Structure formats: C-alpha cells, structure tokens
Image (spheres, rainbow, N blue to C red):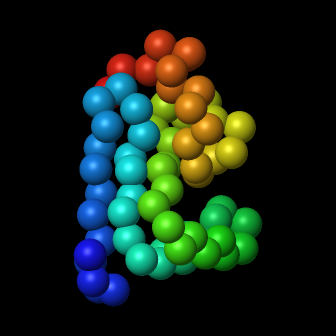
Amino acid sequence: MDDSTLEIIIIANGPAKIKCTKAEITLPDGSIVTKEKPFSLCRCGKSDDKPFCDGTHNTCGFQG
C-alpha cells in the first residue's frame, strides 16, 4: 500500500475497517485524532469508544 492508498472494508454485521498509512479524524467536538495504522469505525452505534469500534457489535445483535 502506498502513501496515497485508502481502503475501506465494510465487515458484514461489524465495523468499517480502514486501511491506510495515516488518517486524521475530526471528532464532533472539533478535536482531531491521528491514526497511523489500520483501525475500525463503529457501525452498530453501541461502542463506548465512538467513532471507533470496540467490538460491541459482537454482543449487541448488530446486523448490517
């Protein structure tokens, strides 16, 4: 993967997995989080670490 490549993989009944070299995520409060390795974004809405996935989709019955 080169520096300009971004890959988003939607996991069935799970998160959106983000594969990139570096990402800056602007949170609702305006703060910016920088990720420099693959990470996952919550799709179930139940994560205690929103917008990031904490695995809660495995126990909350999320389908999507």
Say whether residue 1 is left or right of residue 49: left
> Residue 6 at x, y = what percent?
30, 71
Asked whether 54 or 45 is in front, the reply is: 54
Compared across the picture, whether 12 is left or right of 28 comes to left
Residue 49's place in the image compared with 36, above or below, is: above
Point 49% across, 56% down: residue: 39
Comparing 47 with 4, the one in front is 4
Query: Where, quadrant-wise, is the C terminus in this rendering?
Result: top left
Looking at the image, which residue is at 49% across and 49% down?
41
Q: Percent from the top left, x then y, of residue 54?
A: 61, 38
Which quadrant of the rendered structure holds the N terminus?
Answer: bottom left
Up-down relation of residue 10 to residue 62 (above or below): below
Residue 37 sits above or below residue 14 on the image: below
Q: Which residue lies at the image location 56% right of the left edge and 15% below the top edge?
A: 59
**Location of residue 5 in the rendering, given as x and y in whole percent from the top left corner:** 26, 77
- Residue lying at the far bottom in this picture: please name it: 3
The spot of residue 56 in percent (x, y) is 59, 27
Q: Quadrant of residue 55?
A: top right
Quadrant location of residue 53?
top right
Q: Quadrant of residue 25?
A: bottom right
Question: Residue sitting at 56 percent across and 70 percent down?
Answer: 35
User: Residue at the front extreme?
Assistant: 1
